[in-house]
Amino acid sequence: MIEALVGILGAATPLIYVTLAGVLAQRSGIPHLGLEGLMIAGACAAVVASKQSSSVAFGLAVAIGVCVLGSLLLWFVIEKLRANPIIAGLGLTGLGLGGSDLAIQSIYGSEGAVRAPFALPHLGAWAGEFAGLSVLVLALPFVVGLLWLALRRTRFGLRLAASGEHPFAARSVGADPAQMRLIALALGGVLCALGGAELALGSLDVFSIGMTAGRGFMAFAAVTFGAANPLGASAAATFFALAEYLGIKAQLVLGSAAPPELLLSLPYLATIGGVWLSTRLRGGINRGSTISELREY
């Protein structure tokens, strides 16, 4: 039982960090399809910078800088160039995937995987069977709780929600929707960097090309499934991580008795099922005017 819990926490933590970034963007009115690109950019930057400097702290700082810059680029394209948020997000994902591949090829030649000299600090012996988990796992409940409080119980959260749902009304009470979206995306960049660093330097200390394997899109689905609520979205991300863990365990237990492709597809099937269920429970896809307001104001 403890082993399963450790495995689920290890799989869920990077996904939840990126999901929280999607929650911030969604609350500001931007459907963030660039999560995948930011996550892999953060993972790549964390490993490369850590390897080059022999410092995990420096690698994490570089990852945060790279992801925040990517988020600012997305904000500029959407707010200043009036690009469609969905297309801009997909473009950012392509930039992150292609850019990380190019960076690895340029720095290390044809090497497909790069091993860092250090991993993130682990909890240590005091945590017992959870000793192998990183400090970002321990910090996660506090991050989720603080974000929930910020979005639900502060003026910032109310202004952010107003900017996402009714930008014209938000401006009438003194909130600048563009500024609120900038803050939301920048904070989301930090969270994506933490998620990418946890994926590459948490239980592992290696970066491989394409290692996010669609987790950014799972995070986007978790935001939808959880109604852009930090608690609900985190629960949805944990459910997807559970499906991933069960797929890996089933592959180890069943071996060749079941097609490995089917078992590895379980988290993606769970993602599709979760999005379908969330739309059914809410009476269909919400065809609100968020994007049109974002483009018109």
Image (spheres, helix red, strand yellow):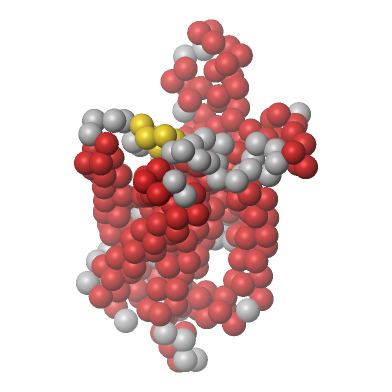
Question: Camera-side residue: 62 or 68?
Answer: 62
Name the quadrant containing residue 67.
bottom left
**Residue 272 in the image, given as x and y percentages of width and height:** 48, 39
Outermost residue toward the top in this view: 257
**Residue 169 in the image, given as x and y percentages of width and height:** 46, 86
Position of the N terminus by quadrant: top right
Question: Camera-side residue: 272 or 17?
Answer: 17
Residue drawn at (26%, 67%) of the image: 77
Outermost residue toward the front in this view: 54
Task: Examine the rendered structure and indicate whether residue 100 appears above or below residue 157.
Answer: above
Residue drawn at (46%, 86%) of the image: 175
Whether residue 184 is visible here, answered yes or no, is: yes
**Residue 189 in the image, given as x and y percentages of width and height:** 43, 61
Position of the C terminus by quadrant: bottom left
Question: Camera-side residue: 50 or 287?
Answer: 50
Whether residue 235 is visible here, answered yes or no, is: no
In this rendering, the count of numbered labels is: 0
Task: Examine the rendered structure and indicate whether residue 66 appears above or below residue 72.
Answer: above
Name the quadrant containing residue 146.
bottom right
The reply, left or right, for residue 84 in relation to residue 181 is left
**Residue 155 in the image, given as x and y percentages of width and height:** 59, 82
Question: Camera-side residue: 201 or 23?
Answer: 201
Task: Examine the rendered structure and indicate whether residue 270 appears above or below residue 41.
Answer: above
Task: Examine the rendered structure and indicate whether residue 11 appears above or below residue 159.
Answer: above
Residue drawn at (28%, 59%) of the image: 88
